[in-house]
Amino acid sequence: MPIQTFQFNKLDFKWIDIVQPTTNELKLISEEFMLHEYTMLDCLEPDHLPKYEEHQEVNFLITRILTSFPDNADTIQSISSKIAVFYTKDFIITVHRAEQPILGEIRSSYLETGKIKTTSEIVTKIIWYVLHSYDKPAIKLAEEVDMFETQLFLKTVSPGMLEKVYYLKRRASLCKMLIVLSEEVITSVKTTANDNPALQDVKDLQLKLVMLYQQVLEDVNNLLNIYISLSAQRSNEVMKVLTIFSVFFMPLTFIAGIYGMNFNYMPELNSKFGYPAVILLMISVSLTVFIWFKRKKWL
């Protein structure tokens, strides 16, 4: 991809934007602006986490913007894209693998209109847009948790619910991790006095998002605990029914076992009322067990 350079009227800095750079392109940029080689290597790592560094007069930061939110996402790369930023008061360089519409929006809405006048203000605005990309997904996750909770209590659980809840928890966990790691980037940015309110808005947004995703994770954990508890309750109900049946039939089986033995000298075998007496005994035992269960309130 070609390297785009933007120069704005009445501004003393330029903006170099690089999309899907090659190693040679990064090397040329590194030599021209005296950038550290290790920071350039970080630009090539697609799964690098947010961070902030200072190398002499050059400030370097990496942030990750949420680009997609598939239901089966479970890795950082599947939900976010990296934006690397180098900046001093004389220039700002943005490096990213995919097109980022937010950068064009910042140029058209803030630089071309004169609302932003320094590179640090651009960085503040980039971070704000990046964090804002996590806002709607947090609401979506909360709605999914409510939906699963409704299904769980109304006993309309689908076979793949547990898998869906796992992926939901995984997405929430990844987003929270990226937002928490972004705190170092936010607190390290130094901006102008006029831009301090905007930076404070970014800090407030970051804190709000951490709380939102923390709440989602807590709700998911509670949902899993409820699911396990209800599953255990259903298992206990089944075991209760089986236990009741076994208690009824165990004494009957015992009596039948005794009279099923092949001994020649069993006095009841020659009795005229032996058979009805044993049947009556079995009925009496069953009634006794039933009355006992009723008094114990097990039935």
Image (cartoon, helix red, strand yellow):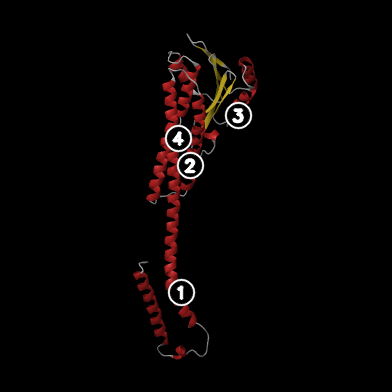
Residue under pointer 4: 210
For badge 1, the amino acid type reads Met
Find the distance from the CA under tag 1 to the CA under tag 3.
Answer: 69 Å
Label 3 packing within 10 angstroms: few (<14), some (14-19), many (20+): few
Provide the secondary structure element on which disc 3 rests: loop
Provide the secondary structure element on which disc 2 rests: helix
Q: Earlier in the sequence, mark 4 or mark 2?
A: 2
- In this orientation, which residue lies closer to the viewer: 5 or 39? 39
Q: Earlier in the sequence, mark 3 or mark 4?
A: 3
Provide the secondary structure element on which disc 1 rests: helix
For badge 4, the amino acid type reads Val
**What number is the disc on residue 250?**
1
Find the distance from the CA under tag 3 to the CA under tag 2.
Answer: 26 Å
Q: Residue at x 45, y 56 (%)?
A: 232
Residue under pointer 3: 45
- In this orientation, which residue lies closer to the viewer: 8 or 269? 8
Residue under pointer 2: 169
Find the distance from the CA under tag 3 to the CA under tag 4.
Answer: 25 Å
For badge 2, the amino acid type reads Lys
Q: Residue furthest top?
A: 10
- In this orientation, which residue lies closer to the viewer: 82 or 278? 82
Label 1 packing within 10 angstroms: few (<14), some (14-19), many (20+): few
Q: Is residue 19 above or below residue 148?
A: above
